[in-house]
Every structure is written in structure tokens, then in C-alpha cells.
Amino acid sequence: MRFSPILSSILYTFSNITRIRPPTPLSYTASIRPLPLRSMSGIPFLGALFGSSTSKPSKMSYPDQRGDDEWRAVLNKEQFRILREKGTEPPGSGKYDKHYPEEGVYTCAGCNTPLYTAKHKFSSGCGWPAYFDSIPGAVTRHEDRAWGMVRTEIVCSNCGGHLGHVFKGEGFDTPTNERHCVNSVSLNFSPEDKVVKGAGSESKA
Ligand SMILES: [Zn+2]
């Protein structure tokens, strides 16, 4: 009798498997909708859709449309590898990994757009700078299917430079339960907080 619970659970599992039916082609197809096409030329868009995981960031969606040669002229090798070729810095190696200023703004190392404030940063212990949120609109998300995983890539909304990935629901004690895992190489830091005026921290005179 000792094995009967296991046996019955196996039987139960099998009986459930036999009840599983794949979704009908019709309903599956119906769930796929064409992506909204905004003003753009079609060929680069298709290239971005069907390009390999190592494809360069699509230039069409971003205000800053500099080409690779122009980026090479202003970025060092490591910045180009990470920002323009979606590279990743080794964990624990980045200069902003354990950087916790009181105030200031982290900007895109490519185009200097403010991306995160010091207030967004938290200690995740993951080996890369972690932020629970970005400056509104500064960061754009894409599905990333590289390396056999489905992750959410984040890029600079102004130049499309690769920043890192967003992970959700990890249980960190932050307002969003999201972790923007960003390469230090993709960032610069400006100690003068020019974006958020410290709304909650101003003392009354
Ligand atoms: Zn940028």
C-alpha cells in the first residue's frame, strides 16, 4: 500500500496528459496580431523583426540615428560592444555596481540622455547596477530571445543603445518589484540631479 499514492499520482498525471489538447490552429492564429506599424519604411522594420539575436539595434525607431562609424568615433571599444552590439559586462566589474549616491542622474553613455536617478537605484547583489524604475519614457523595452531564453531587453529610447534587461517578480522590496539590470558601461553619472527636483525630500523653510 505504501506505493499506491505515488502510483495513483502517476496515473492521475497520465490521465491528465491524455486530456491535454493543443490549441486549435484557428484560436492560435487569432491571438497573433500584426504589430502596429508606425511611420517608417518597411524594410528596416522587417530586418529588426527577423534579424538574428546578434543584430544591431534598429535605427529607425530612435531619434538619434547615428550609424556604426559615428558611434565608433565617440564610444570606446567596450562601450560599442555593449551599447551597439548588445554585449554584457562581467558581473561585479562595473563602476556603478556598488555606487549609491544620494542624488544625481545616470545618463546614457552613448547620447547622454538621462535614464535613471540615484533614487531609482537599489542593491540587488546581482553584480550589475539595479534600478527599480527609470525616468519616464527614457527606456524602451523589447523582447529578447537570445541564448534560448525569453527576456525583456531595455534600450535607451533616444539612441537605441543596449542597457541590459528587466526582470520582474523577484521579490525585492522596491515599489515596482522590477529590476532593471543595467551594464555600467552603458551609463555615465552626473551628480547634479537635473531631472527630478526631489519632490519628496525638500524641507520647508
Ligand atoms: Zn542613448
Image (tube, rainbow, N blue to C red):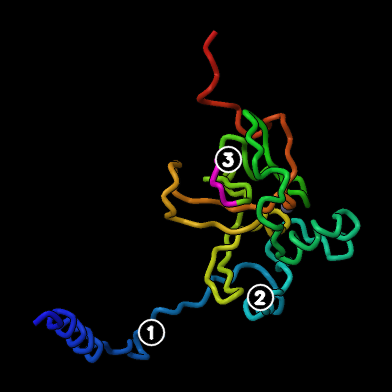
For residue 134, above or below residue 27:
above
The residue beneath circle 2 is 53
The residue beneath circle 3 is 121
Query: Closest to the observer: 116 or 49?
Result: 116
Q: Is residue 73 left or right of residue 165?
A: right
| Amino acid type, callout 3 | Lys
| Amino acid type, callout 2 | Ser
Place of residue 145 in the rendered image (x, y in percent of width and height, measured from the top left): 57, 73
For residue 157, above or below residue 112:
below
Residue placed furthest toward the right: 73
Residue placed furthest toward the front: 2
Q: Which mark is residue 96?
A: none
Residue drawn at the location 69% of the way across and 59% of the way down: 162
Instruction: Report, in whole angstroms, how far the alpha carbon at label 2 lies from the one at label 3.
Output: 28 Å
Residue drawn at the location 63% of the way across and 58% of the way down: 164
Of circles 2 and 1, the one toward us is: 2
Quarter residue 196 falls in: top right
Query: Closest to the observer: 170 or 151?
Result: 170
Mark before the other along the chain sequence, 3 or 1: 1
Magenta residues span 120-126
Quarter residue 205 falls in: top right
Q: Which mark is residue 28?
A: 1
Mark before the other along the chain sequence, 2 or 3: 2
For residue 128, above or below residue 40:
above
Q: Is residue 171 left or right of residue 5?
A: right
| Amino acid type, callout 1 | Tyr
Q: How many residues crowd around disc 3 within 10 Å: few (fewer than 14), some, or many (20 or more)?
A: many
Instruction: Please check the rendered image and state whether residue 39 is part of the magenta-colored stretch, yes or no.
Output: no
Looking at the rendered image, the quarter that the N terminus falls into is bottom left
Element assignment for label 3: strand
Place of residue 118 in the rendered image (x, y in percent of width and height, measured from the top left): 62, 35
